[in-house]
Amino acid sequence: MKGYERIAVQITNLLRSTPRGMTITDISQSLHLNRNSVAKYLEILVTSGHIEKQRIGRAKLYSLSQRVPISAMLNLSSDMILILDEQARIWYANDNLLAFERRNRSEIIGKDLTEIPLLIFSDPEVRARLGSPSNGQEYQKEVAIEHGEDTSFFTISLVSTIFEDGSQGITVMVEDITERKKAEVSLKEHLQFLQELLDRIPTPVFYKNTTGHYLGCNRAFEEYTRRPRHEILYKTASEVLPSELANQYDALDSMALETGRMQTTESVYLYDDGTSRHSILFKAPFLKPDGSRGGTVSTIFDITDRKKAEATLQRRIEELEQQIGRLR
């Protein structure tokens, strides 16, 4: 034990033996310490909740706190917590912060941030905000911090703090969001993979929620509608398709959601340039994790060529029948 911790223990032990309290002069004389040094350590102990201060006339009387020290409560937090005074000197650091920074409390308490570079302030914007007025507003930013071979992600919050003597300071709260970030990256990669799979399917595929809004589609559906994906997603069929076709799709959605069964129909897409595509549409409901209906998933099989072949065959049959008729 050394530095701040040693002197802090001496002061708290002395006050424990004197329940009625002691002045700064009493404590400095009993411990044979400089009065200004004692005053500094007493303010730190008051801020951390280990001792209490009360005024009796002009004197300040210090006694052991009867409350649970704030430092004990802050050490229960999963966040890293640091308290700075208005000169950006470190007044308090909880165990989580000390462990992350790999420092002892005696190394940093009472020190200026220029003397003790900390990893949590490696972001230039966060450092700059420490020296600018907050106007009572909380500042928050997500940062990436490299330590060793690892990179961790944190949300850093700066909150204005008023000490018992009326002076201002800043409480820094650092939440580790590394696992959340990893989960977000994993989910993003998974969604990108699923989209890649959909885009490799040569037939149009799309899916909608129960209110009829498009949640996703593949590249083939973009080509089918002749619209880019951003003009399709989160819109309804009436905003994407010709009105007659949109009504047909909506009716089939309702049937699929109501019955819970696949629905099939033939449809014709009439484009603005006068061309058309004949298709067979398949719609089926999909379920959410709780078993309720989540929406519909659909696929479209183009039968335009088949329809053209059927029409050509029908004409040939009619021509043959006419020729046979003339022979008779």
Image (tube, rainbow, N blue to C red):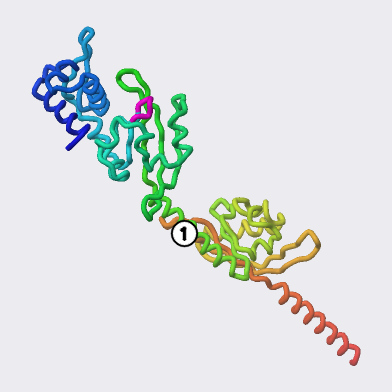
Assign the N terminus to one quadrant of the image: top left
Residue at position x 71%, y 77% in the image: 306
Residue at position x 52%, y 57% in the image: 295
Determine the image quadrant of residue 316: bottom right
Assign the C terminus to one quadrant of the image: bottom right
In the image, taking residue 78 as reference, residue 328 lies left or right, namely right
Q: Dominant secondary structure of the magenta stretch? A: loop
Asked if one can make out residue 76 in the rendered structure from this viewpoint, the answer is no
Across and down, in percent, residue 35 comes to 21, 19
Give the amino acid type for the residue marked by disc 1 in the picture.
Leu
Q: Nearer the viewer, residue 108 or 168?
A: 108
Q: Nearer the viewer, residue 29 or 265?
A: 29
Residue at position x 64%, y 56% in the image: 229
245 w.r.t. 47: above or below? below
Determine the image quadrant of residue 109: top left
As drawn, the residue found furthest toward the bottom would be: 327
Across and down, in percent, residue 25 comes to 17, 15
Across and down, in percent, residue 33 comes to 17, 23
Callout 1 crowding tier (Cα within 10 Å): few <14, some 14–19, many ≥20: few
85 w.r.t. 289: above or below? above
Q: Nearer the viewer, residue 312 or 13?
A: 13
Residue range of the region highlighted in magenta in the rendering: 85-89
317 w.r.t. 77: above or below? below
Residue, disc 1: 287
Residue at position x 76%, y 76% in the image: 308
